[in-house]
Image: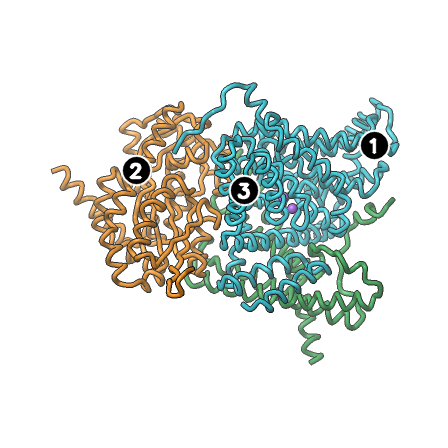
């Protein structure tokens, strides 16, 4: 069992690195292609329909890859009314685990929904790019929800073991905390 | 006190981007819905989600497959989303007049019904949004050179892009929602569209020129999910078919005159009417034909194109006798 | 579904919401369960809505502007900007707040009000305000409020879309929104100046030499606003393209000219900024899913029917409308709100003889407030992500600004002439072509 979990987490870490690389690739292709479009149109009087379609698919990929990393680094938008009132770290830990379990359940529901969604698209495939079907591009949606489930699970295991989970920090924080 | 035996009607949800009171929306509301509801002896009730509250047509297609909605009213390019072969009807300069459209509707109705069934839809009504024209905020579009200079805002898909390319015009790809801001702002200065659209989006104060040539036919269809339709009592189906021609004729009168009214209103508002010379028009139509061949085997079969052209040919010969 | 299960689920969701579960799990999970258990529909329905994000107007600009904002905020260019604005406005009490409002307003008007202003501009202005001596909570609240004040200025996308949906003249709407927009901007500026004077934020005497030096140091930044503003108003680029120009220019100046961002840093910045984008868009997508459930069940209609059945006077209607729209603004994003709600309220407003143009201004001003109101307040979310501050804390710091905006809203609602004045002065009210 432990081997399975360790293997899963190792695989998960690889997936996270791939997600980051993909984000970088997609964002920069979006920048280059959309800037190229501005140049092409204003200087060479050329316009390409696929640019807009590419950019819109790019936004979806960025949204779901980014959201899946936001789960890994616990950067999701949340409205925390009560938990800071909890006095002991022990209680806080319990709440955090409860929330991660809740998030796992919801992500599982969303994953089921998005698999149904992709299957529905697959029934009558359409093609925005020559040979690649739209349903293939939309696979990112269930994929990212599944990665989120693993992220939550890994966070639960870390919390139980007293380890800290990976974090992301902004450099500007130092400026923010100056008084 | 409601009687316990009272049967609740089955609810069919329809979604359309057409607003409730005008154009296609008006025809759906005042002609189609009563026909289905009364035809089914009020065992079916139709709830319409007007004005795009359920999203755009690509969303309707997905929502129909998921069963959230059971029907939709769509026009123009959207008709090709549901049934790609419909793009054959929207090829540039395919039809010259309403008579030709009406003839094809009569002789090829079954072909298009079958095609829709292939994708899971019942073609409940086949109407017309109208013919599309050229509009520009900058160029008269009365010579072929002008087309070379104009920047056409385009979201109509591959056929339009190809057609504009053959004219030497520059297509500016814009999202549907961004087309109007792009025209107002001046990023794009020309477009192909129905008069109705120019009025509804308030583009007409910006539009300086109209070339009222019938660039392309734009259908308006009402689709019902095939599973729902098939489950319908045969009596109701029969009654609906009996009325169908009448319904379509009524809707056609409304929509075609709406579009003419809009075109006249735009011209009356101040847009200048412009025309190509007969030689230029001929060149343009020849160029347009290259797109017909280009998309055969891609969006529609070669046989369907040949069949359509054959019918048009015999209609024209018969008429010119 | 049995009452006990329903009540249990609702309780569970509220509990997790209050204890800080990610908002997308509450809204998105709620949408999935409502569709599945209550409407007996596919669980994929809310996913269709989430993917509709890709077709939202101006959506492509969001990741690009957010990335550009991160680049500028992380480089020394923020300091250069601050030095420049200080050299220009440092002599005025609250000078920097004036600059903050003006710059944010222009940026929001152009970018279609998507919350990106706070990242692109706020990321630079917030540290500056804090360094100048403004309190942290004032600065945050101020930046967040300033980030929505451009909604009422041309060529703001919400105005254009409102005009098309409500069938009111877009040009007249632009004109009618101008004075109410200036009212909001003016009140925010007064608030900033007042705060600066009262808290003795140090002013610096104006110096030509300092201004010239600051201008020279910022020479690579100064052209950007001209490219963007000039490009958009001049009809050279669309708003989405403005984002791409901005980010390309930022990359060019920061990586090649100033050479302040090495490649490794660029990679980190990409990940950080796109995590922000993902967190924001997932909540917006989930909100689209929940909105679609409300639409599917015709709940906005139901509420409007109840309102119009029980309201007798125009004054009361305007009041209830404000409350209704504030609630709508709490839950829906602005574009959904326009598409879903406007066709419902316009006919009712007509029965109360409300001027359609005034209704438009009132509607947009109301939803401008919606950017700052919990639980779904886009500006609060963006600020929370960008500045790493809890949303709860932001609710608190935004209250003073919210009161000011609410005051403006009351004036706009009950003084129609404020909106209609310019239309009357410029002459005829144009009647739209009938269809
Ligand atoms: Na926003
Ligand atoms: Na809000």
Reading the image, the residue beneath label 1 is C196
Chain of the residue under the numbered disc 3 shown in the image:
C
Choose top left, top right, bottom left or bottom right for residue A156: bottom right
Figure chain in cyan:
C
Reading the image, the residue beneath label 3 is C338
Q: Is residue B309 left or right of residue B284?
A: left
Find numbered disc 1 in the image and state the secondary structure of the residue it sits on: helix
Chain of the residue under the numbered disc 2 shown in the image:
B
Pointer 1: residues within 10 angstroms few (<14), some, or many (20+)? many
Q: Is residue B319 left or right of residue C405?
A: left
Work out whether C31 lies above or below A149: above
Q: Quadrant of the C terminus of chain C?
A: top left
Task: Give me the residue at 67% from left, 66% from top.
Answer: A102
Marks 1 and 3, how far apart at CA: 37 Å
Q: Is residue C394 left or right of residue C225?
A: right
Residue C306 x %, y %:
53, 47
Residue C391 x %, y %:
73, 51
């Amino acid at each position: 069992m432990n081997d399975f979990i360790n293997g899963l987490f190792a695989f998960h870490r690889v997936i996270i690195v791939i997600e980051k690389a993909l984000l970088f690739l997609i964002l920069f292709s979006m920048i280059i292609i959309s800037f190229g479009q501005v140049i092409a149109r204003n200087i060479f009087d050329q316009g390409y329909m696929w640019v807009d379609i590419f950019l819109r698919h790019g936004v979806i990929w960025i949204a779901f890859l980014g959201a899946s990393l936001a789960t890994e680094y616990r950067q999701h938008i949340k409205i925390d009314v009560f938990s800071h009132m909890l006095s002991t770290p022990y209680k806080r830990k319990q709440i955090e685990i409860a929330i991660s379990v809740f998030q796992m359940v919801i992500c599982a529901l969303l994953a089921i929904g998005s698999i149904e969604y992709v299957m529905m698209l697959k029934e009558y495939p359409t093609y925005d790019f020559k040979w690649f079907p739209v349903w293939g591009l939309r696979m990112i949606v269930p994929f990212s929800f599944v990665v989120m489930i693993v992220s939550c699970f890994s966070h639960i295991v870390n919390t139980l073991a007293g380890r800290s989970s990976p974090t992301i920090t902004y450099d500007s924080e130092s400026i923010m905390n100056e008084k | 006190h409601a009687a316990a035996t009272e049967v609740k009607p089955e609810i069919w949800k329809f979604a359309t981007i057409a607003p409730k009171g005008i154009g296609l929306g008006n025809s759906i509301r005042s002609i189609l819905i009563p026909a289905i509801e009364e035809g089914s002896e009020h065992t079916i009730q139709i709830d319409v989600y007007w004005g795009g509250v359920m999203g755009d047509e690509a969303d309707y297609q997905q929502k129909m497959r998921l069963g959230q909605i059971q029907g939709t009213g769509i026009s123009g390019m959207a008709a090709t989303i549901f049934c790609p072969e419909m793009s054959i009807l929207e090829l540039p300069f395919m039809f010259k007049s309403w008579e030709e459209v009406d003839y094809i509707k009569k002789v090829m109705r079954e072909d298009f019904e079958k095609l829709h069934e292939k994708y899971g839809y019942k073609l409940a009504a086949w109407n017309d949004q109208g013919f599309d024209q050229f509009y520009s905020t900058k160029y008269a579009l009365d010579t072929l050179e002008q087309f070379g200079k104009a920047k056409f805002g385009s979201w109509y898909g591959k056929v339009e892009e190809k057609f504009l390319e053959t004219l030497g015009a520059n297509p500016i790809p814009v999202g549907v929602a961004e087309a109007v801001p792009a025209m107002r702002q001046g990023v794009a200065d020309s477009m192909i569209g129905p008069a109705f659209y120019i009025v509804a989006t308030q583009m007409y104060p910006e539009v300086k020129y109209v070339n009222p040539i019938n660039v392309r036919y734009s259908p308006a269809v009402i689709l019902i999910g095939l599973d729902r339709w098939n489950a319908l009592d045969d009596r109701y189906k029969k009654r609906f078919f009996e009325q169908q021609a009448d319904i379509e004729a009524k809707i056609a009168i409304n929509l075609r005159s709406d579009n003419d009214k809009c075109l006249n209103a735009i011209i009356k508002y101040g847009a200048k009417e412009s025309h190509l010379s007969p030689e230029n028009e001929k060149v343009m139509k020849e160029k347009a034909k290259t797109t017909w061949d280009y998309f055969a085997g891609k969006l529609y079969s070669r046989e369907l194109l040949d069949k359509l052209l054959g019918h048009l040919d015999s209609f024209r010969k018969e008429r010119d006798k | 579904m049995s009452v006990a299960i329903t009540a249990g689920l609702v309780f569970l969701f509220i509990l997790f919401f209050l204890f800080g579960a990610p908002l997308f799990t509450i809204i998105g999970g709620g949408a999935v369960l409502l569709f599945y258990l209550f409407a007996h529909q596919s669980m994929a329905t809310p996913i269709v809505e989430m993917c509709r994000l890709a077709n939202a107007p101006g959506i492509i600009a969001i990741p690009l502007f957010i990335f550009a904002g991160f680049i500028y905020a992380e480089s020394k260019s923020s300091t250069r900007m601050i030095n420049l604005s200080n050299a220009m406005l440092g002599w005025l009490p609250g000078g920097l707040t004036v600059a903050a409002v003006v710059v944010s307003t222009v940026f929001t008007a152009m970018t279609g009000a998507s919350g990106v202003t706070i990242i692109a501009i706020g990321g630079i202005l917030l540290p500056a305000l804090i360094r100048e001596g403004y309190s942290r909570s004032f600065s945050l609240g101020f930046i967040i409020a300033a980030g929505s004040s451009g909604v009422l200025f041309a060529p703001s996308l919400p105005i254009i879309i409102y005009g098309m949906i409500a069938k009111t003249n877009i040009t007249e709407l632009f004109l009618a929104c101008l004075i109410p927009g200036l009212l909001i901007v003016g009140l925010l500026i007064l608030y900033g100046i007042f705060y600066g004077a009262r808290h003795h934020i140090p002013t610096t005497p104006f110096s030509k030499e300092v201004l010239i030096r600051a201008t020279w140091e910022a020479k690579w930044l100064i052209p950007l606003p001209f490219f963007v503003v000039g490009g958009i108003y001049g009809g050279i680029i669309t708003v989405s393209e403005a984002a791409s120009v901005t980010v390309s220019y930022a990359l060019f100046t920061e990586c090649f000219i100033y050479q302040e961002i090495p490649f490794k840093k660029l990679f980190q910045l990409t990940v950080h900024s796109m995590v922000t984008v993902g967190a924001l868009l997932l909540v917006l997508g989930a909100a689209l899913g929940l909105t679609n459930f409300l639409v599917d069940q015709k709940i906005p209609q139901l509420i409007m029917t109840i309102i119009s059945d029980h309201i007798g006077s125009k004054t009361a209607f305007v009041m209830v409308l404000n409350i209704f729209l504030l609630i709508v603004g709490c839950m829906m994003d602005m574009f959904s709100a326009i598409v879903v709600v406007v066709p419902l309220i316009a006919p009712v407003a007509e029965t109360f003889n409300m001027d359609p143009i005034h209704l438009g201004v009132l509607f947009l001003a109301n939803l401008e407030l919606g950017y700052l109101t919990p639980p779904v307040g886009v500006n609060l979310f963006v600020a929370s992500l960008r500045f790493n501050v809890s949303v709860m804390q932001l609710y608190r710091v935004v209250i003073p600004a919210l009161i000011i905006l609410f005051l403006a809203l009351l004036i706009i609602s009950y003084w129609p002439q404020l909106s209609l004045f310019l239309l009357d002065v410029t002459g005829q009210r144009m009647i739209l072509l009938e269809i």
